Image (spheres, helix red, strand yellow):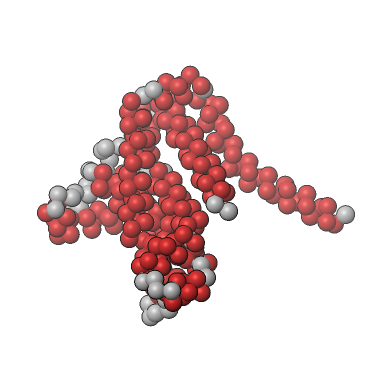
């Protein structure tokens, strides 16, 4: 009897959090209506913002794949002085407010010496896609790096050592043994980083208001025209985010 009461309590508590997580999403679609959703999907500005958000978030993910995987491997495989500090630096963007991150990026890559350095190579971060990319990367890179780090730690070191004894060089071992065996965590982290970048607002809006990503477009329409004009855009991006989430779940499930 006590066991039954315990289970009922767990179910009731679980239902409460499910209620708060699901009802706002369902209410968004019901409140907007199918006609308004279709009209919003046909809105060129909305489509352009979604495509821009997808594209730049994907480029941020690719950048971290090239630069973050080596870092994740070093942290996972080697014990060295300062490793804990390095891991903390990777995790810091998750903990700080996103608007604060935007201010930090603006004061670093805006009208500063470092900003001028990048301008020399034709790269500007304020008001450009590069700015959107660096904001997305700054706040979502930990998802990829930490997931890859966990994946590398799961790979048996003996496999790498056997490959080395058979004549493979370290680079070959990394790409032919380590990465394939950690691919599930790497892909999962990459997809999570990409999907997290899609929803980034706080840092992006400080660095780049135009061109508008979808979260910035929602904010702009809410400020300019009110809830009736911003809610349909929000419903579209929520629906898109759900689709992305289901794809991520499907891909990671197939990798098991």
- Residue drawn at the location 63% of the way across and 44% of the way down: 18
- Residue drawn at the location 23% of the way across and 58% of the way down: 108
* Residue at the left extreme, as displayed: 120
Q: Provide residue 48's location: percent of width, then percent of height.
A: 32, 31
* Residue at the top extreme, as displayed: 35
Which quadrant: the N terminus? bottom right
Q: Provide residue 139's location: percent of width, then percent of height.
A: 38, 54
- Residue drawn at the location 51% of the way across and 67% of the way down: 155
The quadrant holding residue 88 is bottom left
Camera-nearest residue between 154 and 201: 154
Can residue 223 be seen here? The reply is: no
* Residue at the bottom extreme, as displayed: 81
Q: Please give left or right for residue 73 compared with residue 242 in the image.
A: left
Can residue 33 be seen here? The reply is: yes
Camera-nearest residue between 28 and 195: 195
Camera-nearest residue between 138 and 168: 168
* Residue at the right extreme, as displayed: 1
Q: Please give left or right for residue 187 compared with residue 21 in the image.
A: left
Note whether 7 is above or below 85 in the view shown: above
Q: Provide residue 52's location: percent of width, then percent of height.
A: 32, 38
Camera-nearest residue between 193 and 177: 177
Note whether 92 is above or below 192 in the view shown: below
């Amino acid at each position: 009897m006590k066991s039954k009461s315990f289970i009922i309590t767990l179910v009731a508590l679980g239902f409460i959090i499910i209620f708060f997580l699901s009802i706002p999403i369902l209410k968004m679609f019901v409140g907007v209506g199918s006609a308004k959703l279709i009209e919003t999907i046909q809105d060129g500005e909305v489509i352009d913002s979604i495509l821009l958000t997808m594209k730049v978030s994907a480029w941020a993910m690719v950048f971290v794949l090239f630069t973050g995987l080596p870092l994740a491997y070093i942290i996972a495989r080697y014990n060295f002085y300062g490793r804990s500090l390095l891991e903390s630096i990777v995790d810091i963007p998750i903990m700080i407010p996103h608007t604060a991150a935007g201010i930090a990026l603006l004061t670093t890559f805006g009208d500063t010496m470092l900003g001028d350095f990048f301008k020399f190579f034709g790269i500007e971060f304020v008001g450009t896609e590069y700015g959107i990319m660096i904001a997305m990367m700054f706040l979502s890179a930990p998802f990829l790096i930490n997931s890859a780090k966990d994946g590398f730690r799961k790979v048996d070191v003996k496999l790498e050592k056997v490959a080395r004894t058979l004549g493979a060089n370290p680079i070959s071992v990394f790409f032919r043994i380590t990465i394939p065996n950690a691919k599930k965590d790497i892909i999962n982290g990459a997809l999570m980083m990409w999907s997290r970048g899609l929803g980034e607002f706080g840092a992006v809006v400080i660095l780049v208001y135009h061109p508008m990503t979808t979260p910035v477009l929602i904010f702009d329409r809410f400020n300019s025209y009110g809830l009736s004009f911003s809610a349909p855009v929000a419903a579209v991006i929520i629906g898109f985010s759900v689709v992305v989430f289901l794809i991520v779940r499907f891909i990671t499930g197939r990798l098991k």
